[in-house]
Image: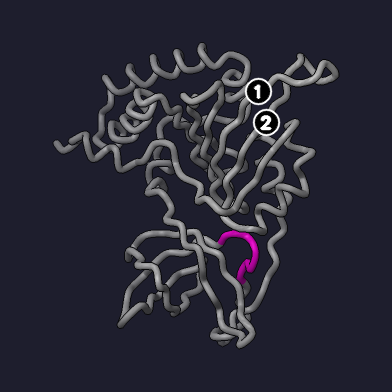
């Protein structure tokens, strides 16, 4: 299903609107999640934001952290003003993902799909051997993130596709025989959810049906996935934009590990 989500992400076509405050015509995605960075905070709730190569001054009722990146919904109101809503802080993974010594391709994930136990065992052995021989503090930190995540029952992977590196997290769900996941997509933004099997009528393949629940950033992403739901390879899927997608293992957990030299 995750591979199908990646394919749908490539098909997602952003709707463009122009920003009235710019001297030149600038375009922003008014439907899909926008990734912005907080450059500075001025008086009150006013912030200077960076969107691509463009800066924008706006207000936010939600307190933002300077230097951090957020996904947000961006639209223009009747007065032609840019309105930003539902800000979701992006995990601090950019440098981690960029410099990660272990990056997988979609082909590498085929082993995970066919034999997850063998994949996990091979990954564990690799991480332990690399940690023992890490020459630099940065390498140790990045490998430690994967190792600590695995120790907590979360498989954190960096997947490289079309020249872009993304974080993928998978974990068995304790409450039932299910798999939880968290993934970041270039167009659709973060998506989290769970996948499980249920008994089904005899006319269904193998006597079970594959079900899923997905949490997405906004209603437009929800609409896109619902439009392509038949392509997900699921028998039943519930998609909601009410709950914020959340990572399964946070990079902040590394604060427990002192890697200073």
Identify whether 141 is placed above or below 85. above
Dominant SS of magenta comes to: loop
Residue at 74% in and 48% down: 226
Query: Are there few (<14), some (14-19), or many (20+) residues within 10 Å of tag 2?
Result: some
On the rendered structure, is 209 left or right of 36?
A: right
Q: Name the residue under label 2.
A: 211
In x, y percent, where is residue 107?
63, 26
Identify whether 203 is placed above or below 237. above
Q: Name the residue under label 1.
A: 197
- Circles 2 and 1, Cβ within 8 Å, touching? The answer is yes
Residue at 66% in and 42% down: 238
In x, y percent, where is residue 234?
73, 32
Q: What quarter of the picture does the N terminus occupy?
A: top right
Residue at 39% in and 14% down: 125
- Using the image as rendered, state which of residue 206 and residue 125 is in the foreground: 206
Residue 30 inside the magenta-drawn segment: yes
In x, y percent, where is residue 2?
63, 35
In x, y percent, where is residue 244?
50, 51
Q: What quarter of the picture does the C terminus occupy?
A: top left
Magenta residues span 28-33
Q: Which residue lies furthest to the right in this view?
A: 203
Task: Find residue 81 and report its image quarter.
Answer: bottom right
**Alpha-carbon distance for marks 2 and 1?**
6 Å
Element under label 2? strand
Residue at 34% in and 62% down: 67
Element under label 1? strand
């Amino acid at each position: 299903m995750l591979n199908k989500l990646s394919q749908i992400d490539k098909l997602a076509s952003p709707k463009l609107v122009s920003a009235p405050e710019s001297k030149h015509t600038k375009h922003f995605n008014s439907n899909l999640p926008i990734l912005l960075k907080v450059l500075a905070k001025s008086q009150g709730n006013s912030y200077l934001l960076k969107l691509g190569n463009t800066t924008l001054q706006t207000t936010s009722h939600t307190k933002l952290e300077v230097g951090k990146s957020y996904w947000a919904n961006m639209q223009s109101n009747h007065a032609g003003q840019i309105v930003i809503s539902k800000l979701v802080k992006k995990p601090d993974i950019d440098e981690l993902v960029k410099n990660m010594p272990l990056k997988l391709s979609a082909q590498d994930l085929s082993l995970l799909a066919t034999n997850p136990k063998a994949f996990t065992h091979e990954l564990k052995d690799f991480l332990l051997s690399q940690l023992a021989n890490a020459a630099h503090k940065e390498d140790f930190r990045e490998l430690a993130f994967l190792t600590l995540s695995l120790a907590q029952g979360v498989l954190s992977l960096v997947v490289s596709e079309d020249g872009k590196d993304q974080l993928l997290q998978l974990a068995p769900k304790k409450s039932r025989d299910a798999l939880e996941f968290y993934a970041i997509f270039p167009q659709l933004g973060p998506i989290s959810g769970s996948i499980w099997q249920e008994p089904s009528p005899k006319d269904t393949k193998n006597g079970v049906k594959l079900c899923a629940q997905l949490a997405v950033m906004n209603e437009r992403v929800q609409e896109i996935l619902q439009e392509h739901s038949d392509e997900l390879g699921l028998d039943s899927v519930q998609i909601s934009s009410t709950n914020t997608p959340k990572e399964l293992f946070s990079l902040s957990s590394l604060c427990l590990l002192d890697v200073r030299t």
